[in-house]
Image (cartoon, helix red, strand yellow):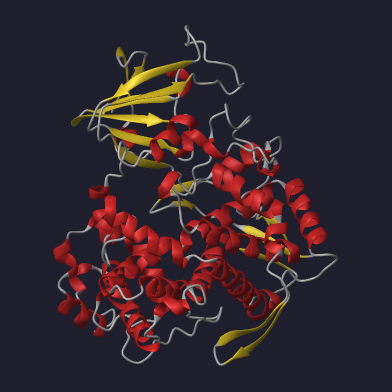
């Protein structure tokens, strides 16, 4: 890929830079801020050697917000996301009036009563983990990868609050009659198999009839595909694509249980709310089958894993967080104290004291947001220019916060983005921009306790009309999980896997322990921790 320095007046100059193969394939080391400082501006233009279409990377907050606000001038390239239309069209993959339709339904489904349900169900999931697993261990024990734990927590929470399907922490793995795998296994398999499902051609997955046959055959069918692909195929079939899929069963049950769905809006789980929001518009039934996956649990799970890793490294911040939690919960009171009992294979919530604790746990939220700044789940977001447009960006700052020496005239420049160009909102570049985040590589949750923190320079949940509708869901879930774990356990890095190195700084420790790679979202390579009962 050729990157070209942007100069003023809508033109470029001939200084070019050839990037390595991984950069040319879009696989930049993450999270990191590209060399905007070397080029002088918070924007870089580029051209692939195999494609003459120009691309513009933008890491200027005002420019990014303008682009996000201009749905007509900078629409989303939905054709690039069509491979993710596994279960039908969704708010992720459409534009125009169709997007408005999907957005209206999904927005109505994420009600405040549903957030209260997220709090309740997540509390129950964590308590079940404590009672059936962690409390049976010694006072000090190690977890080889905390991501496995946070993934299971968030998956069980979204199963309960999102789909109304409660499950135990210890899974017996027995599917109900007529199914090859459990709902839990299907949900996990779909999440892990999204990239495989998107990359392989449609003929691999076959027709609905063949999917039904494959699901009935369990994991034994289509041996020529390889077990990994078989597992993905069965998961997709069982969750939503076969005629007897879990989602279709749920939809039939929901439609038959309440003819007047609008009267139930805001009273149930996310799936029930989506069906209720559709009202009598039967054509909208296909909307909920795919839009419901916008609340993917892996984004929150990986954010929590990174957060616990950061707290384990920065012991002073962990102590501040613990003190804050104890202060908010008034000397040991459980947050929104739950009385619950095991009924069958579920956890029954029988009493909720208060939901207002969520809003009081401000430092917990600050830790989570600072983690997502350092480790954005999606490091960049694509748009395209539907018309010739002029964009203004500021001069790039050095890490010391000084204007780049390459800037000769003024602190801003304007340039033309030609129609048809790809525009990359560089989320990682924005999150590491020292203009908005002084000392950007350091873990400083206090940034988000300042009422004037730079909201326009924080893009984890996107911005503008396409901002993530599930943001509140993720925040409530993360606050609940982090509060309960930190209140009960002190977290440290497992020195057996990551030995202490004399003279190693916290930043160096952070870089060695929290290595990540890009899958469908940014994923920790493996964070080994030790938990000590407080």
Residue 421: percent from left, percent from top: 26, 31
User: Furthest-top residue in view?
Assistant: 408
User: Depth check: 456 or 20 in front?
Assistant: 456
For residue 446, above or below residue 344: above
Quarter assignment of residue 503: top right
Query: What number of labels is visible?
Result: 0
Task: Between residue 94 and residue 430, name the one nearer to us.
Answer: 94
Q: Residue furthest right?
A: 331
Q: In the picture provided, is 480 more to the left or to the right than 317?
A: left
Q: Residue at x 68, y 41 (%)?
A: 451
Percent from the top left, x then y, of residue 38?
Answer: 45, 18
Where is 176 relative to 503, above or below? below
* Res 95 seen here: no
In the picture, the quarter occupied by the N terminus is top left
Residue 151 spot, x, y in % from top left: 51, 65
For the C terminus, the image quarter is: bottom right
Say whether residue 292 is left or right of residue 159: left
Residue 13 shows in the view: yes
Question: In this view of the protein, which residue sits in the foreground, 9 or 224?
Answer: 9
Q: Would you say 484 lies left or right of 268 here?
A: right
Residue 3 image offset from top left, x and y in percent: 32, 23
In the image, residue 49 above or below residue 351: above
- Residue at the (39%, 60%) spot, across then down: 104
Nearest the camera: 281 or 41? 281
């Amino acid at each position: 890929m050729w990157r070209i320095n942007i100069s003023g007046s809508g033109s470029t100059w001939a200084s070019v830079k050839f990037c390595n193969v991984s950069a040319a394939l879009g696989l930049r080391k993450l999270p990191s801020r590209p060399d905007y400082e070397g080029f002088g501006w918070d924007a870089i233009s580029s051209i692939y050697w195999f494609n003459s279409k120009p691309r513009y990377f933008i890491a200027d907050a005002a420019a990014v917000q303008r682009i996000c606000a201009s749905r007509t001038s900078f629409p989303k390239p939905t054709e690039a996301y069509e491979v993710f239309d596994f279960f039908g069209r969704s708010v992720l993959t459409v534009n125009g009036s169709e997007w408005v339709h999907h957005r209206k339904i999904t927005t109505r489904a994420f009600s405040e009563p549903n957030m209260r349900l997220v709090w309740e169900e997540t509390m129950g999931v964590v308590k079940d983990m404590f009672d059936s697993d962690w409390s049976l261990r010694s006072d000090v024990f190690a977890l080889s990868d905390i991501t496995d734990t946070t993934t299971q927590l968030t998956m069980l929470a979204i199963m309960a609050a999102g789909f109304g399907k409660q499950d135990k922490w210890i899974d017996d793995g027995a599917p109900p009659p007529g199914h090859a795998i459990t709902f839990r296994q299907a949900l996990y398999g779909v999440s892990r198999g999204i990239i495989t499902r998107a990359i392989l051609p449609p003929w691999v997955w076959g027709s609905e009839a063949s999917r039904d046959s494959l699901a009935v055959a369990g994991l034994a069918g289509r041996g020529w595909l390889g077990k990994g692909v078989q597992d993905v195929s069965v998961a997709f079939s069982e969750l939503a694509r076969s005629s007897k899929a879990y989602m279709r069963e749920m939809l039939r049950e929901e439609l038959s249980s309440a003819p007047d769905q609008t009267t139930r809006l805001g009273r149930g789980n996310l799936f029930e709310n989506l069906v209720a929001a559709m009202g009598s518009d039967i054509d909208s039934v296909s909307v909920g089958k795919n839009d419901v996956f916008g609340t993917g649990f892996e984004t929150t799970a990986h954010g929590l894993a990174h957060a616990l890793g950061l707290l384990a490294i920065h012991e002073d911040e962990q102590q501040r967080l613990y003190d804050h939690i104890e202060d908010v919960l008034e000397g040991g009171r459980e947050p929104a104290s739950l009385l619950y009992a095991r009924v069958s294979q579920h956890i029954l919530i029988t009493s909720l004291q208060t939901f207002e604790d969520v809003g009081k746990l401000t430092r917990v939220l600050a830790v989570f947001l600072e983690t997502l700044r350092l480790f954005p789940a999606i490091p960049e977001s694509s748009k395209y220019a539907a018309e010739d447009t002029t964009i203004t960006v500021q001069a790039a700052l050095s890490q010391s916060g000084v204007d780049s020496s390459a800037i000769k005239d003024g602190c801003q420049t304007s340039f033309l983005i030609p129609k048809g160009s790809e525009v990359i909102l560089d989320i990682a570049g924005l999150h590491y921009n020292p203009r908005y985040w002084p000392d950007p590589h350091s873990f400083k949750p206090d940034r988000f306790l300042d009422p004037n923190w730079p909201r326009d320079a924080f893009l984890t949940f996107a911005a503008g009309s396409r901002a993530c509708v599930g943001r509140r869901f993720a925040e409530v879930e993360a606050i609940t999980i982090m509060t309960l774990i930190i209140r009960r356990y002190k977290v440290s890095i497992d020195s057996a896997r990551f030995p202490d190195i004399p003279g190693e700084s916290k930043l160096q420790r952070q870089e060695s322990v929290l290595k990540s790679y890009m899958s469908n979202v940014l994923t920790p390579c493996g964070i080994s921790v030790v938990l000590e009962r407080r």
